[in-house]
Amino acid sequence: MKVVFHDLYRSVYDYDPAAAAGRMESIVDELAGLYEFVEPQPAAEEDILLVHSQEHLEWVKRRGPLYEVAMYSAGGAIKAGEMAVQGDPAFALVRPPGHHASRDSSWGFCWFNNIAIAVEKLRRLGSVKKVLIVDTDLHFGDGTDNLFEGNSDVYYYSVYNIKGLEECLSINRDCDLIAVSAGFDKHKDDWGLIYSTEDFAIMGGMISNHARKFCQGRFFAVLEGGYNHRVLGKNVKAMLEGFDLGNTTG
């Protein structure tokens, strides 16, 4: 497992919790020395336009320094996806997040839909056909769901509990790739007050085990939410350990 990261993600580009000072550092401090870090390039405008309108792109452009960070965030997801289809799973440690960004609008600290851009680029290149997107965030990824609505080759699933994830995986054995919108704000010490740190390891293990059995080991993840800096890095590390080890439930 490699980590896709750029120092620009450390910048405080806005005033929302996803852009808060120290958020990236809380994760980097946990992962440094354990995982190889890989630097991405920014997304190209044509990448953004795979899922967003020209009007939306221009709107984000007008937001000053945020635009550059958002382009690198989308680029980080693309890099992780490209690595995954080569059999080298990756975690895109990016911000801003993206799963609330639709074709013409965005909210919830999101601007471009990073994971949707990466998935659609891989599909257009012919690298994959059928994709399962698993979202572990507290909030439903309405942007991702909207963007792939009616597309029978991309299945979006928002995890409501671990049993539900198990059922989702059991009916998606014909996908070429699993893409994970990795949100950590459902933790018991974060906004959601639900999951333990070990739960993220279990989910990571379930996803990677499924990918190894049915997708030739092709999967990647992109950071979404998670706002308690005291536990965020530990939760990310737990999920990556699950990715590395396979099915931690046995």
Image (spheres, rainbow, N blue to C red):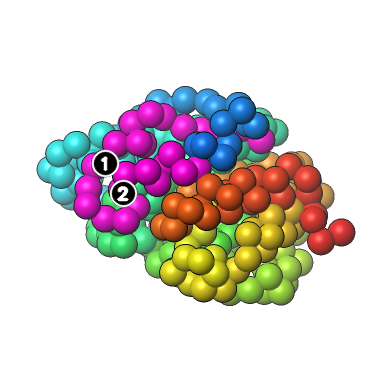
| Circle number at residue 2 | none
Residue 229 appears in the rendering: yes
Inter-mark Cα distance, 2 to 1: 6 Å
Residue that sits furthest to the right in the current view: 250
Q: Secondary structure at mark 1?
A: loop
Q: Which of the marked residues, 2 or 1, is nearer the chain's N terminus?
A: 1
On-image quarter of the C terminus:
bottom right
Residue 213 shown in magenta: no
| Circle number at residue 12 | 1
Magenta-highlighted residues: 1-27
Q: The residue under label 2 is which amino acid type? A: Ala
Position of residue 14 in the picture relative to residue 39 (left or right): left
Identify the residue at image location x=36%, y=36%. 9
Identify the residue at image location x=47%, y=44%. 26
Image position of 180 with respect to 166: above or below: above
Residue 242 is situated, as x and y percent measured from the top left of the image, at 71, 50
Whether label 2 touches label 1, CB < 8 Å: yes
Residue 67 is situated, as x and y percent measured from the top left of the image, at 23, 39
Residue 204 is situated, as x and y percent measured from the top left of the image, at 68, 53
Q: Nearer the viewer, residue 189 or 53?
A: 189
Q: The residue under label 1 is which amino acid type? A: Val
Look at mark 2 in the image and give the residue it sits on.
20
